[in-house]
Amino acid sequence: MNHPMTAPAPDNPTPIRLFWVYLLLITALAGGLRLYNVGQWSLWEDELFSVRSASNLGQVQLSKRFGQLPTAAGLMAQGVDLGEVRTDNTAQWRSLGVEAFGARIGPCLVGILSITLLGWASRRLLGDRAALIAALLLAVSPWHVFWSQAARFYTIQFLFYNLALIWYLRTCQMRSTRLAVLAGGALLLAYLSQPPALVLSVVLAGDVLLCLIRRKPIGLGKAGWTAGLVSVAVCLGLLLYDKMHASADWEAWGHLQGHSWKVIAASMVLRNHPVVLAVAALSALALIRSRPRLTLYLVLGAALPVLALMALSLGGSFYVHERYCFVVHYAWLALAAMGLAAVWESVSRHHGAWLAGSATAAVVVTLLWADLSYYTHGHRRRWNDAFAYVTQHRQPGEDVAVLSSKGTPIARYYLETDDVLAYAEFPTSPQKLQALDRPTWLVLPAVSATRGELFPWLNDEAVLKRYYDLRVLQPFSSVRVYYYLPDSTSAQNPG
């Protein structure tokens, strides 16, 4: 017979008012980090796709509409008439008021609110101190700051995915119908933000299986089982519905070139940050005996979705990107926070709070240092700088070719003109370049995550005018601007 689990004893419980004071101070820090220069970094094409979707919600698949609401709300708050924003007039979007701040402020506010909500939800699961440390780590996390400053649906997916992650185990601890319904509803909202959130079901199944193997009670109860199975069934039903009614979109996504399992694995080390991974892994080893269910559950939450997505990347018929793994970031931070809280508790008994907090301070300062690097250009391709340069130096009769996505929306948006060569006309070989009969500006990423350096032969065939780099470990997001003259004897040096 299954019996409800008892909740873990809070680590040196904090008075509730003081807990909320700390949590709100952490939220204020998170707000400052996320609002800083939120409208300054260059937009990138996926953000323009979000603007397009947010302005045409009726044409968006059911499984993605909810995730577009923050972007739509931010644009409307900035005074944008969404009815005028269409796919065929991207060159007019800036004149219609579509700017980075309005597109990003909605997801940004969701990101800030996530610190408060996840910190509050974690309190009874992790304990007071660990919950506050987890909230602090999330507040200064460069990965979470990045997505909080992006006009995409990842902050709202992250919020509801991890609320479902927390409330599921709390349901097992308390056998609470209310928590069961909240967990099921949060999973559904996470899925409606972005379908890959369904990987949470793999984590929940893994927890159930481990309980059976360990011969420990699962603790879900009828309400928990019902809410969980119904929410997963609804998500699967929506998935089938969208596949039937938007088969062309799903087929197109399946043919996109995603990330390999190697890229995903390497990205998880970089995105979660090596220091967080090291502290989380050591914490899991140290706490596995004293808090086995919670520790194993968080390990599953940190690893299983990544492994599942890596396996899907091997199939070739699924588009998998490293950003789909963003949802696991909280589990890594929670594991690290539990270990840091245990260190704090142990050291404070003998040496006081100042030394007890040193381990936590070391991790926080490390993440803040990474934030400092992020704030150079927001880890985004500097399309805005590149196109500003082209706009300044482009002469009548000169073409612009851009290697981005079909429709070249990023060029049309920043140049504010449709006078851009079609995507298929970008010269991808010396022969195609030599076939151009007009002076042409070439704007392209320097490096692809899947193909390495792009078209290095351009350095011999055209003049490199600008190289817009970033302060990162590798030049994945850098942008190059070349100028090509068909007749080399009439070479000029514009700009």
Image (cartoon, rainbow, N blue to C red):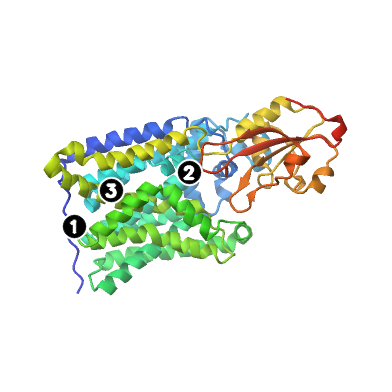
For label 1, the crowd category at 10 Å Cα-Cα, with few meaning under 14, some 14 to 19 and many 20 or more, is some
Q: Where is residue 59 drawn, in percent x and y?
A: 58, 50
Reading the image, the residue beneath label 1 is 7
Reading the image, the residue beneath label 2 is 69
Q: Is residue 30 above or below residue 153?
A: above
| Residue at disc 2, secondary structure | helix
Badge count = 3
Q: Which mark is residue 266?
A: none
Q: Is residue 177 visible?
A: no
For label 2, the crowd category at 10 Å Cα-Cα, with few meaning under 14, some 14 to 19 and many 20 or more, is many
| Residue at disc 1, secondary structure | loop
Q: Is residue 73 visible?
A: yes
* Label pair 2/3, CB-CB below 8 angstroms: no
Residue at the left extreme, as displayed: 350
Disc 2 residue type? Leu
Q: Where is residue 416 drawn, in percent x and y?
A: 68, 31
- On-image quarter of the N terminus: bottom left
Residue 218, quarter of the rendered image: bottom left
Q: Residue at x 43, y 63 (%)?
A: 234
Disc 1 residue type? Ala
Whichever of labels 1 and 3 marks the residue nearer the N terminus, that label is 1
Reading the image, the residue beneath label 3 is 337
